[in-house]
Amino acid sequence: MVQKQSVDQAYEIAKARYAELGVDTEAVMAELKKVKLSLHCWQGDDIHGFLFPGQALTGGIGVSGNYPGIARTPDELSGDLHEALSLIPGSHKVQLHAIYAVTNKKKDLDEIEPEDFKYWVDWAKQERIGLDMNGTFFSHPKVKENFTLASPEAGIRDFWIEHGKRTRAVANYFGEQLGQQSVNNLWIPDGFKDNPVDKATPRLRLIKSLDAIDEKQYDEKNTIEAFEGKLFGTGIESYTVGSHLFYNNYAITRNKLWTIDAGHWHPTEDVSDKFSAFLPFGKGLMLHVSRPVRWDSDHVVIFDEALVRITRSLVRDNELSKTNIGLDFFDATINRVAAWVIGARATQKALLQAMLEPIDQLKKAELNYDFTQRLVETEELKSYPFAAVWDKFCQDNGTPVGMDWMKNIRQYEKDVQFKRD
């Protein structure tokens, strides 16, 4: 077990080193504590949900692995989330999908109501966290030929429009009950596997469907919509109706949020470069932090160069206030609770390292064309003792330091997860 004395001693050294650069580590930790991450509930049960738990995944979505202890009930899933949240410093949020409604009635996606999520609101109040929402536009018989809101069939479109309206009502309910804005994210799998003749008409249908979903006005203190694009997907390799540029423009013209999922871009693209290009024009961002090993493979987030670039851009350009940060990955080859903790703590570490930079000083050097100084400082900062500040942050927030949190996971496996049939 990491000793408090050793953490404090290392921190005092790090504090002094950063003070030499004009960086106040106490102020930085206070800022980091304000950043809420939104954990995705679907890591805990491999995206089965509770409305249609036996339904096969479709829309290019798949989970690999069969690690024991998967959550099967609302109580098991919320218990696993509670365990994860206890090991992540700070106060955060949880993202739900529509299929995680908890109801005794047999309901379809166009019939869900706010009361079907009372279980989650009551739980969130106990945890003192917020909730975000996602419509479930996949793994359903009414996803016809890979089309939902852009379908050429009015009956298919109408079903999904109603579902979209229902999710907005649920998100508004979350905001009213919890006193925190709930982001309602929309992603659809619509597209063609091979080259289409008509690229324009499906997008015009999608615009009309989205506008119909958003007809009712809700107070933005309770909820706001976000729209998530994609480069391509399994079964829609040649044409994606809801492309990045489509939703970029839709979000700007409708004064909504644009969702950037790190796994939905070409592997050679730097998604962090998109933030400063969009935010001068757009209302704000919803960010899904994922790790695309082979494009949209949704691996557990780690402290890698891509994550560092994402967090540096948000911090250096002062974009955190306009960005909602969510996690989005699924891996059933490892303990599912540990996956949440690994991803969240990695994201917080990367944010901390970025916050510990003397940003004003670096920007001044750049403004004066002193690129030598800029390069020297950014390289030297890579080996500065930010890990000691991270350990102190964990300790001060009552969460395990270093790898100590894995002891909690092993005990939780023994006491809870491995006892599940």
Image (spheres, rainbow, N blue to C red):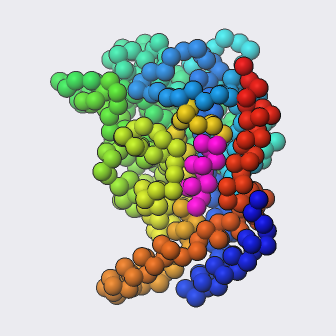
- Residue lying at 55% horizontally and 33% vertically, measured from the top left: 333
The image quarter containing residue 75 is: top right
The correct choice, above or below, for 65 with respect to 38 in the image is above
- Residue lying at 59% horizontally and 82% vertically, measured from the top left: 18
The correct choice, above or below, for 201 with respect to 129 in the image is above
Q: Is residue 336 left or right of residue 9?
A: left
Residue 113 visible here: no
Screen quadrant of the N terminus: bottom right
Taking depth in this image into account, of 130 and 246 the one nearest to the observer is 130
Q: Residue 113 appears at what percent x and percent y?
A: 66, 24
Screen quadrant of the C terminus: top right
The correct choice, above or below, for 380 with respect to 280 in the image is below
Q: Does the magenta stretch include residue 372?
A: no
What secondary structure characterizes most of the magenta part?
helix
**In this picture, which residue range is highlighted in magenta?**
338-349
Q: Is residue 346 magenta?
A: yes
Taking depth in this image into account, of 168 and 136 the one nearest to the observer is 136
The correct choice, above or below, for 245 with respect to 379 in the image is above
The image quarter containing residue 265 is: top left
